[in-house]
Structures are given as C-alpha cells and as structure tokens.
C-alpha cells in the first residue's frame, strides 16, 4: 500500500481531530468493533471523521502505523508530513526471504492461486469464503528430527519461526504483526491444540522494545487485534478451540512488550535472540528534540553520552561511531551485540550506509567480525517509502564469523517485492567475493551502485575493475602529487547565504568580478563548458545565468586559473561531475569545488604545455572522461558530493599525453 496517495485524508483528519493520541485510540477502538461485528472499520469510525479512502480499507494495521509514525515525528519536532511508516509489502517480503527455507510455499491442490490476497478482503467477505470452503489450503509441512529438537527446546515454532524473535525499535509492531500473519498461515492445518501451543510459544518468546511508552501501549492492542484477525485469539475470555483468551494474550504481551532505550539501557531479556528484524529510526542526533526548548542542550548531552557508553568489560558500546551520527547506525551495532552467535538480523536502513565515508568503520565490522550475507538495494527512483527521496537498503546478516562473499541484489523496485520469496527472481544480483570487493574499495567495503540493464552493468563492472588499481587524486606518490604536498579538494570561497548582499546581477559595463556558481556549468553528450555572461555575450539579459553572477565584495578574486567541479544532484542527469577551467580573476561560490594542486606540479605542467591554461585544459579533459564519471556515479553515497569523494577519484589514466617529466 502506497501511503502517498492518501496523504490528504490524514491532513483532513488532523482538522477534524487535532489530538494524535485520540486519533490512535479511536482507530484501535473502531478496529476492535469491526472485528466484533464482522464489519468494515470504516463503518465503526465516528461520523465526523473524513470518509476513509478505498485504499485504506483493507489493512487497519497500516493506518495505525501511519498515525503512530506521525505522532512520533511531531513529538521529535519534525513535520508529520515527512513521516512515513514501513510499507507492509516490504515487511512481508523481508519476513518471507528470511523464513522461506523453513516453510514451503502453500499450494492450492493443483488450482491456480488467486491474484488478490484473501487477507486484503474485509472480515465479512472472509467469513463468507470460509463457509464456501474457498480459502487457500496449506500443504502439510514435513519437519525433520533437527527441527523437532529445536521445537522441543523452544527455539523454533512448529510454523518455522526462530525463537526468540526481537525488534529493538518495535514502534507500532509491524514486524511482529506480519510475523503473526505468517504463523497463522503456516499453522492453518495444525490441529487446534497444536496450533494453540505453537501460538503461545511464539508470543511468549518475542522480545519487543521501544523508547516510546505510547507506542508500547498502543502496539499491545494492535497485536491482540492482529491475533483476532487471523483466528489465533478471541476478543474475550471465551475462546474457540485453538484460540487464546484475551486475558492470556494481554498478560503475555505485557511481559514481552517493554518500554526502554535500546541504545543506552540494558536489554531486559536474558535469552539472546535468534532472529531480529527491525526498521530503526533514520534520524541524526542533531535532528532530535527540535521542538523542545532545551533541544540544543539535550542533543549535546545525548551525543556525549552515546560516545562514552561502555560495557562491563570497559569496551565502548559503539566502537564505530563517527561523524554526524545517525541513530540507525547505532541500532545496527547494538543489534549485533544482542543477537546470539549464528543468529540472523534483517534491518532496513538508508542505502547511504553502503558508500558514505563515516559508515566505513561499521562496514568493516560487518565484514571482518560477522557474516554479511546479502543486501537489497532500492534506488531513490523506487520510491519505496512514499514521499521519501532516499534510497533504501535491506541488510541480511549472520552474527559472528567472517564474510567471504556477499550477494548484492538490485537495483530493485516496489513491484519486485514478493511475499513468497522476498524478491522477484528477475532482480539483478552480483556476488561480491572478498578479494575483488577489497580491491575495489581499498578495504573500506563500499558497494557500488549498479544499473539494472545487463550490458550497462557489465560495462560499468569492467570500468570499475580497470580504475580500481589506479592511484587516487589525494594520494601520494603519483605524477600529479608534489614532493611534499598532495592534491586537495576545496570548497568555493564565497558562502552565497552570508555574502548575498555582495552578489549582484551581471550587467554590461558594470564593475565587479565574475561570480561563478553551479548554474554556469553546461554540458552536452561530449563536452563541458562555462556559460557565464562575463565570457559569453550571447547569454540573454533575462537568463538566470545573469542573476547572482557578479562579485562586489571585499574578497579579492584569484590571480590564477583553477580547475573547478560542479556536482550534479539530480539523479536523472546523465553526468555526475562537470569539470571546467575557471579563468583567473573569478570568484567561486560554495556550491562548487575546485582542485588545489601543488605549486611545483603546476610549474612543471606550465613549462610542459607552454602555459597554465593549456595545462589545466588538458587535465580537465582527463577528469571529464566518461569512465571517470561512471566511477563517480557508481560510488556516490547520496545526491550531495562530498570532498572526499572527489579526493578518492582514480587518477585518470593517461597514455602518450603525459609530460615526460611528470611520468
């Protein structure tokens, strides 16, 4: 279900019922009434609530997730409009991928499966289908001796779920709810006593934790209603055979659903989880407490506390913490500490984890101390989370051991998700063996973005193999590095926000230095050039290139030409980087970078080519090569280009053009 299509309903709901806690309570109450009377949830809502869209009729849990997600965002000082819960279809695919080896796909006794899931129908329709015996029938699951021993030991349900199951950021309880759904389907052919015992075993071995008390209270109600929806529990204390009584469900859930801080506190369960699935908060520490009057102080204290947390043996709890910390990284490292050796983790995180420099220590931990088995990559264009322009990554990990190879699936799209096998078989895959992977990334274990087209993919992999062995721009010992200095990437000298009063439109005859920013870079399929009115009189008088194009401030422009680079943030563009030779006496905006080349190298280049401009034009042509741009797109962490990405570019390969005294 794509929530972006119904965002207007939530906005109308806010006008009719401003209290988000009241929204959550009303929805759960209506859901319970709907189950009790076998009616749609929409029929049980208060009359003043806006009419429920058809796309929200089939999954009450998704609406609950969205309401709770909006409450959490507002309590953090963020906009509720930017809060989007984990798609149900993604949760089902992750669970299916993890458990599909334990439970064989159900059959319909030779009949073709229906195209519409019966669980998507309102309760009244499902009851009618039950009477007509039109529901899907499961094949009997064969259980081997090893599995029987695990079931007897209480570390696996008969329906195939490893126990204990944990979610350290349970939120609205999406993953345990969808796990209950999986269990209900897998146990549908068990006899009543066997199914009841298996359900009880599953619930009692859950470990669900969240820092929000409101989420914990509401999720308890949600999980009980989910059990009722799938015929595993009753709405009261008079259950039918095979069902749990309401009081027993609430008693068990009250023990396994706890409030606390996973990152800073102690894990309240002694038994280590064997399976952990979660979507932790994607939130930087500096974005916490934005709506709180003491937010600045609270953020500083939280950051200092997390950096200094130590275990009983004196070791740091978060050994990979670096840079502008995002909470999802801390949840990942913490989860590796909680799950038993050999246990499994599935976690949904931003795909920037694969390439950003600040995540390199965490990637190293995953490879050298654990078995990083797989990733699913969803690019920004997949729009997996409605309204979120961020690539999504699903990690698959086995705790302990060492990674020898890792399977990278992607790029995948929303339609590639499958609730039987996880991902559709047509999704491209690449096996990254450790030797090749280490050579590509210089042992920081970054994973490149790869295209879906097979021919483009093969061409890019060939390019990566070719360029990976070359020295990098900022390294020592190559022909562009000086004797005592290395090439550095610098940001343009003028902050356009702070110096806006000194940046004027370019008019003919007026005094001032050319002010160059990203809009002045132009390219076609083969060339890149500077289109600034100071050097191109054909620029129309009303063109945006003439606005903010002249520097009138006190800072003196550079006396020498420079190599400048504009990074394209639009993911749909064909190029990632555009290099030009910036003429002397120009001022550069801070949206553009430039190379700081050692003076002794510039002197040699000038002598060899007969002038600095000619030397820089030669070097600019190398930097604008198609292969180097393909490399930059493959290893981009996100839309923004960081200085370190440019400094880690391979030195463009040169043949006969390289000056003899620089070779």
Image: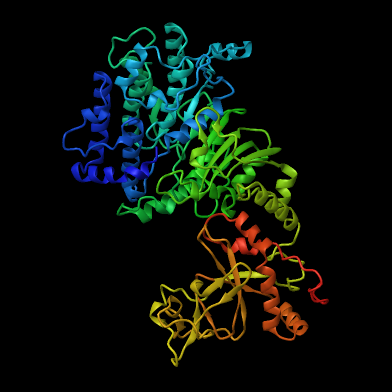
529 left or right of 287 in image:
right
In the rendered image, residue 203, in percent from the top left (x then y), is placed at: 43, 20
Q: Is residue 124 above or below residue 618?
A: above
248 left or right of 338 in image:
left
In the rendered image, residue 489, in percent from the top left (x then y), is placed at: 61, 69
Q: Is residue 390 above or below residue 39?
A: below
In the rendered image, residue 178, in percent from the top left (x then y), is placed at: 43, 27
In the rendered image, residue 156, in percent from the top left (x then y), is placed at: 54, 18
Q: Nearer the viewer, residue 120 or 175?
A: 120
Q: Residue furthest front?
A: 111
Report whether residue 175 is seen.
Answer: yes
Q: Quadrant of residue 151?
A: top right
Colour scheme of this structure image? rainbow
Q: Is residue 342 above or below residue 327?
A: above
Q: Residue furthest bottom?
A: 509
- For the C terminus, which image quadrant? bottom right
């Amino acid at each position: 279900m794509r929530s972006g299509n119904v965002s207007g309903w939530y906005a109308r709901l806010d006008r009719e019922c401003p209290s988000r806690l009241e929204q959550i309570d009303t929805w759960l109450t209506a859901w319970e009434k709907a189950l009790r009377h076998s009616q749609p949830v929409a029929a049980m809502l208060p009359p003043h609530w806006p009419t429920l869209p058809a796309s929200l009729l089939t999954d009450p849990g998704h609406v609950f997730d969205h309401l709770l997600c909006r409450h959490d965002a507002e309590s953090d000082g963020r906009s509720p409009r930017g809060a989007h819960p984990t798609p149900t279809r993604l949760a089902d695919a992750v669970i299916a991928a993890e458990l599909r080896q334990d439970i064989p796909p159900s059959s319909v006794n030779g009949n073709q499966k229906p195209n519409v899931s019966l669980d998507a129908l309102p309760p009244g329709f499902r009851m009618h289908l039950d009477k007509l015996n039109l529901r899907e029938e499961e094949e009997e699951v064969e259980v081997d001796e090893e599995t029987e021993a695990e079931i007897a030991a209480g570390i696996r349900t008969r329906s195939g779920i490893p126990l204990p199951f944990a979610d350290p950021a349970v939120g609205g309880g999406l993953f345990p709810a969808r796990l209950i759904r999986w269990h209900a389907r897998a146990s549908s052919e068990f006899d009543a006593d066997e199914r009841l015992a298996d359900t009880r075993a599953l619930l009692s071995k859950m470990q669900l934790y969240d820092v929000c008390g409101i989420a914990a209270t509401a999720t308890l109600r949600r999980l009980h209603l989910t059990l009722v929806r799938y015929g595993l529990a009753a709405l009261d204390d008079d259950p039918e055979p095979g069902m749990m009584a309401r009081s027993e469900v609430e008693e068990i859930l009250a023990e396994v659903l706890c409030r606390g801080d996973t990152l800073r506190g102690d894990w309240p369960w002694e038994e280590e989880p064997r399976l952990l699935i979660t979507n932790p908060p994607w939130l930087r520490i500096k974005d916490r407490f934005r709506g709180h009057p003491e937010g600045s102080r609270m953020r500083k204290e939280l950051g200092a506390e997390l950096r200094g947390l130590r275990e009983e043996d004196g070791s740091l709890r978060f050994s990979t913490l670096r840079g502008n910390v995002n909470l999802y990284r801390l949840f990942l490292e913490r989860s590796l500490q909680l799950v038993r050796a050999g246990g499994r983790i599935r976690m949904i995180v931003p795909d920037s984890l694969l390439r950003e420099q600040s995540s390199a220590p965490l990637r190293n931990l995953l490879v050298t101390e654990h078995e990083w088995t797989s990733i699913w990559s969803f690019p920004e264009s997949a729009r997996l989370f409605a309204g979120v322009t961020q690539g999504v990554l699903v990690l698959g990990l086995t705790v302990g051991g060492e990674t020898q190879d890792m399977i990278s699936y992607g790029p995948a799209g929303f339609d590639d998700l499958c609730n039987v096998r996880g991902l559709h078989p047509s999704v491209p895959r690449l096996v990254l063996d450790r030797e090749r992977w280490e050579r590509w990334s210089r042992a920081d274990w970054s994973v490149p973005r790869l295209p879906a087209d097979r021919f483009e993919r093969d061409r890019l992999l060939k390019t990566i193999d070719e360029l990976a062995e070359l020295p990098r721009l900022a390294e020592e010992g190559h022909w562009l590095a000086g004797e005592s200095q290395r090439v550095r990437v610098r940001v343009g000298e003028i902050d356009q926000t702070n110096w806006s009063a000194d940046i004027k439109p370019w008019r003919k005859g007026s005094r001032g230095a050319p002010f160059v920013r990203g809009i002045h870079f132009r390219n076609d399929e083969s060339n890149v050039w500077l289109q600034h009115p100071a050097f191109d009189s054909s620029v129309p008088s009303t063109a945006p290139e003439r606005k903010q194009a002249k520097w009138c401030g006190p800072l003196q422009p550079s006396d020498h030409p420079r190599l400048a680079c504009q990074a394209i943030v639009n993911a749909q563009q064909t190029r990632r980087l555009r290099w030009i030779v910036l003429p002397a006496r120009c001022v550069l905006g801070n949206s553009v970078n430039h190379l700081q080349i050692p003076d002794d190298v510039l002197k040699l280049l000038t002598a060899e080519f007969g002038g600095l401009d000619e030397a820089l034009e030669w070097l600019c042509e190398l930097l604008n090569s198609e292969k180097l741009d393909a490399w930059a797109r493959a290893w981009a962490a996100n839309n923004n280009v960081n200085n370190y990405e440019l400094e880690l570019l391979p030195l463009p390969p040169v043949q006969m053009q390289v000056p003899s005294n620089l070779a």
